[in-house]
Image (spheres, rainbow, N blue to C red):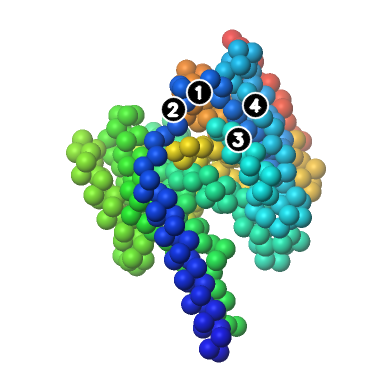
Amino acid sequence: MTVEQKARALARFAEIIDKQMARVEAMASDVAFLDFDSLPTLIIGVCGGDGIGPAITHAARRVLAFLLDGEVREGTVCFKEIEGLTIENRATCGEAIPADVLAELKGCHVILKGPTTTPRAGDPWPNIESANVAMRKELDLFANVRPVKVPSQGIDWLFFRENTEGAYAVGNMGVDVDDDLAIDFTVATTGGADRIARLAFETARKMGRTRVTAVTKANVIKTTDGKFLRIAQRIAQEYPEISFDDWYIDIMTAKLVDEKRRRDFQVFVLPNLYGDILTDEAAEFQGGVGTAGSANIGKRYAMFEAIHGSAPRMVTEGREKYADPCSMLRAAVLLLSHTGRVDKAARLERALDRCMYEEKKYTITGRENGATCEQFADYVMEVLSE
Ligand code: IPM
Ligand code: MG
């Protein structure tokens, strides 16, 4: 390693500290959550993304429009299509979210977003940052809320994945110090851990849940995970009626397959990367990532999406019209309830449970022998009309 290489690495670390300190300061200004009841018109941005994104987003948008038809006519809800979040356009602009697209997103209150392709080294695309990750950071969507339930097995989990920090915060700012040494950075802030833990406990209280479980690796990742856990423990004291426990990510990953123990878990709160991994595992019990939606919640904005990626292979094989829209339909449930439309959210959730788990008139297989996502959306609307 040369003196210059070391200086460059140190300069990068200084840059990271400055950027994260600015975030800490911005977080300290105590902004209240947007009050949806006070909005004359709720603006729902819709971006299809790429891969199977446009197909499944279109299906979910139709169902949402069906449920919100009256409000659209009255003018209390308005849909806004947002183009340009495709990998082609992002690659051309060389940006995770092109500036004009970001400006449009900021003109909405909530966003229904299809999966977007996340490049990695060796792909035909420039290795730009993930659009999901960038959107979560740009709009400060600090809580990634992911429900998973398997009623027949007594599973009813709600995950609160921290969404703006951890290994993801500066995942595109690591340093190749020289040919032999690469370093990435993980971030935890007091404010960041506090707000996700608080939201987890507050939601648990509102929903009458009696247990919150933190998942970290604080025995090894002592500084950042240590902080996350310490703060969760502190917040737990403010909720004496809720029991709190903490697990390490490795054993928690194992416990989720333990049929006797797993149904006892209720609400989880965990740093970004562990939340990413554990929620894919959890979704698998429910029927796979194609069935799981997620809410990305911030104080001013919220974005609703599938928990999975854009499945480009399905498009290459011409199968995108058979993609499972359930992840996006579940995201639509979360959008409705987050914006205060709880009755409609409950109706859609009930209809999805019927279509996915009870009647199963159409099944999605991802192939020609299954239903198309449009057929499935029609089926859901048929059930909703009953
Ligand atoms: C998710 C996805 C994203 C993530 C990818 C697509 C960047 O896996 O929403 O869980 O890692 O957060
Ligand atoms: Mg993931």
- Mark 3–mark 4 Cα distance, whole angstroms, equals 12 Å
Circle 3: residue type: Gly
Which element is circle 4 on? strand
Instruction: Work out whether 172 lies above or below 212.
Output: below
What residue is drawn where x is 41% and y is 43%?
160
Tell me where residue 291 appears, x and y as whole percent. 57, 37
* Residue highlighted by disc 3: 107
- Say if mark 1 contacts mark 2, CB within 8 Å: yes
On screen, residue 329 versus residue 141, left or right, reads right
- Mark 3–mark 2 Cα distance, whole angstroms, equals 16 Å
Label 2 CB-ligand 1 distance < 8 A: no
- Name the image quarter holding residue 250: bottom left
Circle 4: residue type: Phe
* Residue highlighted by disc 4: 79
Circle 2: residue type: Asp
- Say if mark 4 contacts mark 1, CB within 8 Å: no
Which residue occupies the foreground of this view, 41 or 70? 41
The 10 Å Cα crowd at callout 3, few under 14, some 14 to 19, many 20 or more, is some
Tell me where residue 88 appears, x and y as whole percent. 76, 51
- Mark 3–mark 1 Cα distance, whole angstroms, equals 13 Å
